[in-house]
Structure formats: structure tokens, C-alpha cells
């Protein structure tokens, strides 16, 4: 939710907050890097189709982030905000999956 909130703040007040775009995108990209790295580990307990869907969504996030960086526009942030909010909402409705610590 923090990533979505930061991106939404930039989008809502683009003229005053455009300078915060890089920081918001960097935070979001780091979050998604951790998530994608976790779900692509062979020992991740999630079902393989779900892991693949999350990894594919991460690739979309990374590519869309590059698109925003090359041609910044506030309307391009909406999809990132929505994906992050939907993922967070889904995580809140399911019992947590026990993940093994990285060795």
C-alpha cells in the first residue's frame, strides 16, 4: 500500500510532485523485485501457476516503469497504483503463506 500511496500522491499533484516520481518508481520497483525474486525461487510454496502469474505481472510492472521514465505522464501511474492496491487487498484476504528463509 505504501508504494501505491506514493505513486498516487505524485499522480494527484503532478505539477508540484513530479520531482518525486523517480523516488516513487524506485520504491515500487524495489518492492516488485523482492516479490518476483521470492515467487520465482524453486522452494516457494505457492502453486506454480500463481507464481508464474505474479512473475509475469512483475515483468509488466518493470516494463511499464521504463515507459513512464522515458515519457513521464501522470495518467501512466494509474495502472501501477491499481495493481499494487489489488495485490495488497488480495494479500489481506488470505491467510499468510509460510515462506522459507533464504539460505
Image (tube, grey):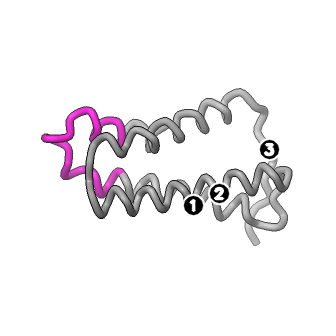
Percent x, y for residue 4?
44, 39
Q: Is mark 2 on a helix, strand or loop?
A: helix
> Which residue is at a point 35% across and 36% down the rendered structure image?
8
Which quarter shows the C terminus?
Answer: bottom right
Percent x, y for residue 25?
37, 54
Of tags 3 and 2, the one toward the viewer is 2
Name the residue beneath numbered marker 1.
59
Name the residue beneath numbered marker 3.
97
Left or right: where does residue 7 sit relative to residue 18? Answer: right
Name the residue beneath numbered marker 2.
56
Please name whichever residue, 70 or 48, is drawn nearer the observer in this view of the structure. Answer: 70
Circles 3, 2 touching at the beta carbon (< 8 Å): no
Q: What element carries label 1?
A: helix
Q: Is mark 3 on a helix, strand or loop?
A: loop
Left or right: where does residue 86 sit relative to residue 71? Answer: right
Q: How crowded is mark 2: few (under 14 residues within 10 Å), some or many (20 or more)?
A: few
Residue 3 vertical placement versus 71 (above, below): above
> Which residue is at a point 40% across and 38% down the rendered structure image?
78
Q: Residues within 10 Å of mark 3 (few under 14, many from 20)?
A: few
Structural distance between the alpha carbons of marks 3 and 2: 20 Å
Structural distance between the alpha carbons of marks 1 and 2: 5 Å
Determine the residue located farthest toward the top in the rendered image. 93
Please name whichever residue, 5 or 72, is drawn nearer the observer in this view of the structure. Answer: 72
Q: Residues within 10 Å of mark 1 (few under 14, many from 20)?
A: some
Amino acid at each position: 500500500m505504501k508504494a501505491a500511496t506514493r505513486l498516487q500522491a505524485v499522480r494527484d499533484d503532478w505539477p508540484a510532485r513530479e520531482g518525486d516520481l523517480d523516488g516513487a518508481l524506485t520504491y515500487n520497483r524495489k518492492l516488485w523485485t523482492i516479490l518476483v525474486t521470492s515467487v520465482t525461487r524453486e522452494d516457494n510454496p505457492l502453486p506454480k501457476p500463481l507464481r508464474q502469474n505474479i512473475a509475469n505481472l512483475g515483468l509488466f510492472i518493470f516494463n511499464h516503469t521504463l515507459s513512464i521514465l522515458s515519457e513521464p505522464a501522470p495518467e501512466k501511474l494509474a495502472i501501477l497504483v491499481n495493481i499494487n492496491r489489488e495485490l495488497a487487498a488480495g494479500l489481506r484476504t488470505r491467510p499468510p503463506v509460510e515462506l522459507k528463509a533464504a539460505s
